[in-house]
Image: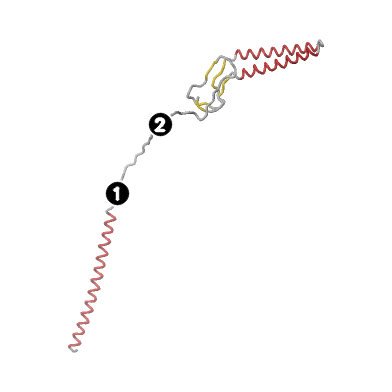
Amino acid sequence: MSEKGLVEGRAGNLRRVLTYLIIAVVLFGGGYATRTYTSKTRSATVSLSTRVLTVTSSNATQSISASGTIEPATQENVNFSVAGTVSQVMVTAGETVQAGQTLASLVTAPLAEAVAQAEANLAGVQAKLASDQAASSSSAQISADEANITAASDNLATAQANLGDATLTSPSSGVI
């Protein structure tokens, strides 16, 4: 071999070795850079801290203060429709009641006596009519007896209604 061929062969080998060396440095540098970057990312993830907190429950209250007048949405006045003496009051102020609930009652003895008296009066005028009809009394007398029966029937109905009205009931649900 000539000297020129020998120099060219060595130069070619040198180029090849340099090329491999550059490739090895690039690969090594890339691997090193990748490892360094990955370890920084992992260390950032691992460095997150965790806190454990104890949870308790409680009631929250809130109060509001205001001044003014409170009025009910509806108000009803209740009274006995018949005169008498109150015998019993079944509710107190501030108590909640339902519609139809008994609130108070009257002494019923005088009202029951009035019913018995009206029944007796009706029976008496009916007996008078029967007697006058049997005696063939005048038509004016028969008409008067029939009018007395109508009046006695009305009195009995009123006495019975009064006895029924001896109980005072709530017309609607609400607070007394």
Q: Secondary structure at mark 1?
A: loop
Q: Horizontal and vertical percent for residue 125?
A: 73, 12
Residue position for label 1? 50
Q: Secondary structure at mark 2?
A: loop
**Viewer-proximal residue, 71 or 90?**
71
Q: Is residue 155 above or below residue 16?
A: above
**Viewer-proximal residue, 162 or 141?**
141
Q: Amino acid at mark 2?
A: Ala
Q: Is residue 26 above or below residue 4?
A: above
Q: Amino acid at mark 1?
A: Thr
Q: Residue at x 54, y 25 (%)?
A: 76
Q: Horizontal and vertical percent for residue 148?
A: 73, 14
Q: Residue furthest left?
A: 3
Q: Quadrant of the N terminus?
A: bottom left
Q: Residue at x 81, y 12 (%)?
A: 138
Q: Horizontal and vertical percent for residue 168?
A: 57, 21
**Left or right for 149, reference 167:** right
Q: Residue at x 57, y 15 (%)?
A: 84
**Left or right for 17, reference 172:** left
Q: Is residue 7 above or below residue 114?
A: below
Residue position for label 2? 66
Q: Quadrant of residue 115?
A: top right
Q: Earlier in the sequence, mark 1 or mark 2?
A: 1
**Viewer-proximal residue, 61 or 21?**
61
